Every structure is written in structure tokens, then in C-alpha cells.
Image (spheres, rainbow, N blue to C red):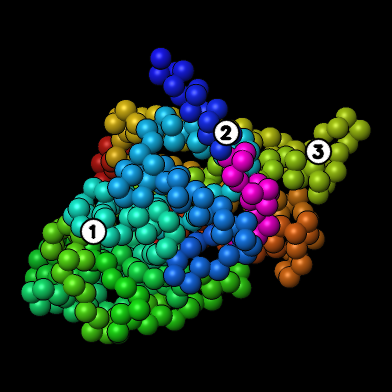
Amino acid sequence: MSDTNTLEDFRVETHAWLEAQCPAEMRTPLASEDDICWGGRHAVFTSDAQRIWLQRMGDRGWTVPTWPREYGGAGLSADEAKVLAQEMRRLNCRMPLASFGIWMLGPALLKFGTEAQKLEHMPKIARGEIRWCQGYSEPNAGSDLASLATRAEDRGDHFIVNGQKIWTSYADKADWIFCLVRTDSAAKKHTGISFVLFDMASQGVSTKPIALISGKSPFCETFFDNVRVERRNLVGTAGGGWDVAKYLLTHEREMIGAIGERSVAKPLGQQAAELVGLDAHGRLADPMLRARIAEFEVDEAAFRLLMERFGDLAKAKQAHPAFSSALKYYGAELNKRRHELLMSAGGSDALEWEGAPSNEGSAARTWLRTKANSIEGGTSEVQLNVIAKRILELPGA
Ligand SMILES: Cc1cc2nc3c(=O)[nH]c(=O)nc-3n(C[C@H](O)[C@H](O)[C@H](O)COP(=O)(O)OP(=O)(O)OC[C@H]3O[C@@H](n4cnc5c(N)ncnc54)[C@H](O)[C@@H]3O)c2cc1C
């Protein structure tokens, strides 16, 4: 049988399985951010359907389709995973699990982790049993991340960690943290850093939520006061954490870039038509907005193709290692434009703070949240620097 036939068979089986196993409730657009399932020890499911959907996908290894089976995945090829994503999209299946473990830590463990670390952590990530947070940024180390000062004193079989992180997304809800610490303060700043994992329930860890302009509080200040971290939880070598950190960041940037793609939500033109209405020719009634939305939808379609091309290049091992910065930059800016346009289409009604027209969550809150897209995971300015230096090979300032 040819590869194409095999892949077509896989598509038919996948479609049938999704059709039979994905509950109807999990095939509707998310009503709000609260409908996202993050799993974890204290997982809160908004419905039975959401819990069942996670369990079914986790059992099949399809929360992490390309991960090896022994680490909780399904061992699918990149082509099969693409078919799975296409079929999920066709049936409007919701993503069963949102997870920093899947998007960031898992790929880093696959590359840098020991066999014991992979076996301990990856299956729990795949099944949504443990929720992770990211301890990178500090009050004086954001864009200049290598200036981080959280110390880890080497005590042989363990480290003692002291210091502070900031902007740690969901630190108050996470079970474990992947964290950058300084193990050698005499070494050059990039070489004295190590990458460690520890339980957020460890003695000496505390979190303090930070309120945002949107009214939400998705991240925290995180404090470490003599936290004991076992040496077996060091990923890579002591002092070699910067390589792990950078590799993980490429995955984070790809993940954030993907917000530029529309998932199961309606096309912007359709959403705007519902808000503004149509003219006698069946076109969006506001001609200025129509032109801006048409331009946006062309850019959105081009971005989707760019993401697909990146996926194909990555599969062929030909993707530029810094290309995730281009995806992150464009995806983040595109998502900001999408929500600016939705606000324009909604007019003053869109400013409604508490109410939720068509039950989609407050447009104003979502719009304000998108402002952070070009900061989280490295700012747009920093991505432009990376693109200039590493992809375009322009001379530094
Ligand atoms: C929603 C959200 C979630 C986040 N979640 C996490 C998380 O879970 N874990 C975590 O560790 N961190 C997290 N962060 C932090 C994020 O990584 C940092 O905010 C980001 O890296 C920028 O660092 P900073 O805030 O210290 O800003 P700074 O680095 O102080 O930058 C301030 C301004 O200066 C500009 N700038 C800085 N350096 C340069 C340069 N060399 N060239 C040009 N311009 C420059 C920046 O672009 C920016 O406009 C999150 C941030 C947000 C907004």
C-alpha cells in the first residue's frame, strides 16, 4: 500500500473515532477562557463532557500525538499528526488540554532530559495529571533573561534555591515549575545558569497573584525561600541551563505564534457582519471596516500558510532555528489586530465590561488581554532583534 493510501486510511479511521468519541459539547466554540481545560492535581472541569474528552484523548495518546508511546504519546508521524489536527478542525473538536508541559517542557525533556526524567514527567503531562508553570522572568531579568539572580546552592545530592520570579503564569494553580536558577555566580552570565524542576508544594515556595488591566489575575510573583530541589531534577548539566532555556523558548514562541491562526472561532468577517449588519449587496455595511477586515483576512490566510510551511520545513529538518521568532512576532501582532477590528465592529457596545454579548466573554477583556501577546514569551522588539540578527544576518547595533 502506498503512503498516501495509508494516510488516507488513517484519516478515515481518525474521523470515525473523533465522530464517535468527541462529545457534542466539546464541538462548540469556547464560550470563554474559563472553558479551557488545564488539567492538574486540582483540575476544575466545567462539565462531564470536558473531563471525558480529556480522558479519551489522553488514553489514546492524542493530547501529544507525536510523543513516543512510552512517554504518553501515540507515536504518530508528523503527517499523521497533521491529519489528526485537520480532522479535529473539520469536526470543530476542542483542544482537550492546554498545557505548558505539552507546549514547552515536554519538547525540552525529549531533547535534554534523562530517561528517568522523561518517564517520570511526560506521561503525567500527556494525561493532564500535573500542571506546570514557567519560572524564567525576574524583576530585573525579562528581555535580558540571562541576568537572572535566583540562586541555587549546590549541596551535592540537592540544591537550595532562594530568590524571586515574576509574571509566572498560573503559578498559584500549577503543581510543578520548570525554573532557571544561577548555580555559579562567578561564571559568565549565560554559563552559570541551570534548569531545574520542582514541586510547587515544596516547603519555601509561595505565590502572590498580580492583577491585570483586564481585571484578571493570570500570573504571580513567585518566591523561593530555602527550597530543596533534588539533584535528579536538574535537566541537562549544571551550568548548561541556558541551552535548555533557549530551546524551550523556541517552542514557547511557536505556541504563542499560533494564536495568529483562527482555531474554531468564526471568521472575523462573519463576526463583524453579525455586529454591523450587511448592505443591500450583502457586503459588510461599513465600507471602511470592510476594507480593513478584508486586508486582515488575507494576512490571516497567508499566516496560516506560513505556519503550514514552517511545519513542513520542521518535518524535513530544514527550518531555521530562529524562525519561531518570526512566527511569534507576526502571530502576536495579527491577534492584536483581530481584536482591534472586533472592537471597531462592536462600537461602544464592545466596551461592555461585565456583560457578554452572544455569550462569548467580554470583548473588551479579551481585547485588553491580547495587548500582552507581544510581551509574553519575549517582546515584539526582541523578536525583531532576533530576526534581524539571526535570520537576516544584519550587523548588530
Ligand atoms: C501575559 C504574560 C504572561 C507571562 N508569563 C510568564 C511566565 O509564565 N513565566 C515567565 O517567566 N515570564 C512570563 N512573562 C514575562 C515575559 O516573558 C516578560 O514580560 C518579557 O520577557 C519582557 O520582559 P520585561 O517585562 O521585564 O520587560 P523589559 O525586558 O524590561 O522590556 C521593557 C521594554 O523594553 C524593550 N526592550 C528591552 N530590551 C530591548 C532590546 N534589547 N531591544 C529593543 N527593545 C528592548 C521591550 O521590548 C519592552 O518594550 C509573561 C508576560 C506576560 C505579559
Give the residue number, with chain letter if any, for mark 3.
284
Give the residue number, with chain letter if any, for mark 2.
15
The reply to whether discs 1 and 2 touch (Cβ–Cβ < 8 Å) is no
Q: Range of the magenta residues?
A: 18-33
The nearer-to-camera label among 3 and 1 is 1
Between 76 and 148, the residue placed more toward the observer is 76
Q: Please give left or right for residue 39 compared with residue 117 in the image.
A: right
Name the element at disc 3. Answer: loop
Gap in Å between the C-alphas at discs 3 and 1? Answer: 54 Å
Name the element at disc 1. Answer: helix
Position in image of residue 168 (x %, y %): 40, 69
Position in image of residue 370 (x %, y %): 56, 57
Q: Residues within 10 Å of mark 3 (few under 14, many from 20)?
A: many
Which residue is drawn at the image coordinates 56% and 59% (left, top)? Answer: 51
Amino acid type, mark 3: Leu
* Picture layout, residue 69 above or below residue 246: above
- Seen as rendered, the residue at the extreme top is 1
Q: Please give left or right for residue 150 compared with residue 357 in the image.
A: left
Q: Residues within 10 Å of mark 1 (few under 14, many from 20)?
A: some
Which residue is drawn at the image coordinates 18% and 79% (left, top)? Answer: 160
Give the residue number, with chain letter if any, for mark 1.
117
